[in-house]
Amino acid sequence: AALASLPEIVRLEVGGSLRRRRETVKDIDMVASVADDAPDEARRKIMDFFTSQPSIQAITGKGDTKSSVILGSGIAMDLRVVKDSQFPYTLHHFTGSKEHHIPLRRRALSMNMTINDYGLFKGKEPHLELVPCKTETDIYAALGMAYIEPELREDMGEIEAAVHGTLPKLVQESDLRGVLHVHSTWSDGQNTIRDMAEACIARGFMYLGITDHSKAAAYAGGLSEDSLRRQHEEIDRLNEEYAGRLRILKGTECDILKDGSLDYADEVLASLEFVVASIHSNFNLSPEEQTRRMLRAISNPYVNIIGHPTGRILLGRAGYTLDMEAVIDAAAAQGVSIEINASPSRLDLDWRLVRRARDRGMKIPIDPDAHTLDGLDDMRYGIGIARKGWLSAGDVVNTMKTEALLKFFKEQRTKRKE
């Protein structure tokens, strides 16, 4: 933000894996432009400013066109400064991915063009003629394609889809109407249901799904059946107070036990408006046992959503091993949703599998798994993963309005009881 305020800078964008919203990022690439006729002094001023920021712990390279630093967090950051006429080509190049660029270059060559970080050119070296492009949209158009959003640039069929005009209109944060996997002080959350409700109203949401832990999650203050009943009384009181502004939904994050049964009896689950079922124990069962366990949970008639399906913690633990393809196929066939857990340390379901779930017709919720007020803002990371998984607003559960959502949850259950 500080950089963007410099008058010398015409355009400034983040590139690389961060722009593509990858689940983990090794370094940060930034591309800035100056006016084509700007003096060298303008670039020097930008680089001096960039390398003198207090958030920097080391400068690893400094020049007029590229500087590299290590941030206080330990992550490396590069800034490239180019002429504004060169900006779209450079941004496109440094956004990647390499896998996306290979077939794109092939397509350019088949049209007697060459593309690199300096431009898009007609002809072959040494007789190259620049194709003028003001934006990345122009670059794709010159190659006979629709614009490809950065999140999709992973060589997963996006080039063919862009040529044939079949790319999805990707979901955006503004499409979300509520949150569905939220903890409160009843279990291991740091804020009351009222606090969470006020925060949801402030963010413009229509509903808040409270899902405190079930009794087996003793480490997280899981709720006994009696506590759950008392929580429902509190929710009823708050719903009267917030009528017309916010609907608080009665849910649970119910533990999936070792044998795949659920931690609450069916009659308790039936008293809830929706159920998120998650594994929090026995991570090291064999892949066959873990898969059987999950499939049994999916077949429970009251389960609406499977929470953080692989249990991975990014850069922490790999998650439990199970046949996720079989889990996705079974869930889709039985009308059960699998969440994108938007917590930045999880981002689980993985985006590569989100696409498979979508292709099977599954509706997928983007859930913050929030334990604090700030945790509600993790939704933005979930949106990145949803977009990488080719999801449109219509593929996402919590883009529905309240009444449609409640109907959806009821229909999910009816489908499995039939």
Image (spheres, helix red, strand yellow):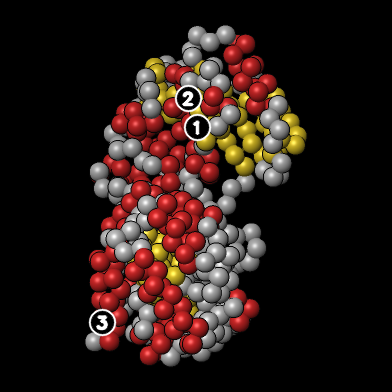
Give the SS element for disc 2: strand
Q: Give the residue type that dot 1 points to.
A: Glu
Give the alpha-carbon distance from disc 2 to disc 3, as whole Å.
53 Å
Q: Mark 2 points at which residue?
A: 11
Whether residue 251 can be seen here: no
Which residue corresponds to the image point at 63% horizontal and 66% vertical from the top-left?
A: 317
Mark in front: 2 vs 3: 3
The C terminus - image quarter: bottom left
**Number of residues whose C-alpha sits closer than 10 Å to that of mark 2, classed few (under 14), some (14–19) or many (20 or more):** some
- Confirm or deny contact between disc 1 and disc 2 (CB under 8 A): yes
Q: What's under tag 2, amino acid-wise?
A: Arg
Quadrant position of residue 233: bottom left
> Looking at the image, do the residues carrying marks 1 and 3 touch, with CB atoms under 8 Å apart?
no
Q: In this view, does 137 lie above or below 167?
A: above
Query: Where residue 257 sits in the image (x, y, percent)?
Result: 52, 86
Name the residue carrying label 1. 13
Relative side of 385 to 160, left or right: right
Residue shown at 61% from the left, 20% from the top: 46
Q: In this view, does 45 lie to the left or right of 365?
A: right
Instruction: List the residue tagged with mark 3.
Output: 414
